[in-house]
């Protein structure tokens, strides 16, 4: 009859326990490693989100303010002084140049719709009278009615400004045309023709003496002022 050795059983038992203990330790170690590996992507994801937010903030569209149109300032030009004898010796075109440089036509009219001041033909003529006497010249402005159009006839007023030299026979002319409106509230036919004539005369004088009007009805400045 075989009797088992107790020492051997104890040894066998101890080996078995030792063998079971080793897998537990290994499992715990593997679990820790997996936990550390999972924690790294979380940190990387946060960093990526922060970068994307910073990029969006940089690409915001810039707000542009509308440009302001500044009005031109009139520049005063110093005209040399001449005696009467010296003035008479100057050529007609030289005296005409001096007259244009000295001319200052005030803006005596006001447009309540566009809210700006402007000059009329009457304002220019009033400023020219003393200068014409000073530089030995005369000025005439004539009107002529013209009909244009084949299908629909339209009436135009053609104004011609004639600048003559009293010391010679030289003359300088300039013409401008304006079309009559079919109708205008608050005006009869004669008033429409008179307003068209005044407008054409002003443009004829502007071209003759180099006057620039930036706030007339056919300019961009007038259109911008009407939209405000």
Image (cartoon, helix red, strand yellow):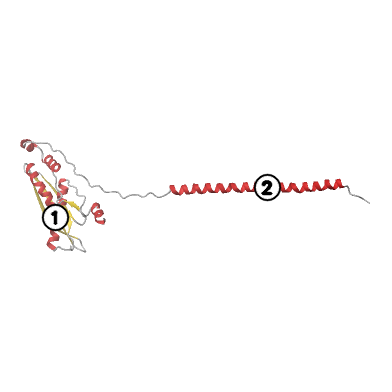
Residue at the image position 51 percent from the left and 49 percent from the top:
49
**Residue name at image x 58 percent, y 48 percent:** 41
Residue in front for this viewpoint, 177 or 211: 211
Q: Is residue 175 visible?
A: no
- Quadrant location, the C terminus: bottom left
Mark 2 neighbour class, 10 Å CA radius: few under 14, some 14 to 19, many 20 or more? few
Q: Nearer the viewer, residue 82 or 159?
A: 82
Q: CA distance from mark 2 to mark 1?
A: 102 Å
Q: Residue under label 1, please give it.
A: 198
Which quadrant would residue 94 be assigned to in this image? Answer: top left
Q: Nearer the viewer, residue 59 or 202?
A: 59
> Residue 226, percent across and down?
24, 56
Q: Secondary structure at mark 1?
A: helix
92 above or below 228?
above
Residue bearing the label numbered 2: 30
Q: Is residue 113 left or right of residue 60?
A: left
Instruction: List x then y, in percent, for residue 97.
Output: 14, 41
Q: Do we see residue 42 in this rendering?
A: yes
Q: Residue 6 at x, y = what percent? A: 87, 47
Seen in the image, is 167 located left or right of residue 195? left
State the SS at label 2: helix
Which residue shows up at 11% across the image and 55% down it? 143
- Which residue shows up at 62% across the image and 47% down it? 37
């Amino acid at each position: 009859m075989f009797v088992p050795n107790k020492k051997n059983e104890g040894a066998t038992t101890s080996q078995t326990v030792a063998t079971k203990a080793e897998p537990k330790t290994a499992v715990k170690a593997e679990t820790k490693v997996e936990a550390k590996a999972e924690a790294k992507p979380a940190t990387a994801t946060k960093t990526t989100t922060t970068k994307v937010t910073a990029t969006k903030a940089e690409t915001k569209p810039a707000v542009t303010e509308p440009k302001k149109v500044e009005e031109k300032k009139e520049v005063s030009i110093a005209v040399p002084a001449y005696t009467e004898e010296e003035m008479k010796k100057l050529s007609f075109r030289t005296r005409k140049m001096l007259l244009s440089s000295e001319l200052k036509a005030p803006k005596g009219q006001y447009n309540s719709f566009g809210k700006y001041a402007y000059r009329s033909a009457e304002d220019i003529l009033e400023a020219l009278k003393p200068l014409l006497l000073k530089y030995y010249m005369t000025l005439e402005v004539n009107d002529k009615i013209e009909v244009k159009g084949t299908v629909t006839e339209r009436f135009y007023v053609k104004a011609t400004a004639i600048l003559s030299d009293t010391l010679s026979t030289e003359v300088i002319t300039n013409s401008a045309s304006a079309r009559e409106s079919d109708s205008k509230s608050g005006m009869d036919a004669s008033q429409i023709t008179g307003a068209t004539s005044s407008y054409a005369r002003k443009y004829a004088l502007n071209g003759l003496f180099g006057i620039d009007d930036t706030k007339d009805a056919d300019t961009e400045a007038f259109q911008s002022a009407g939209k405000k």
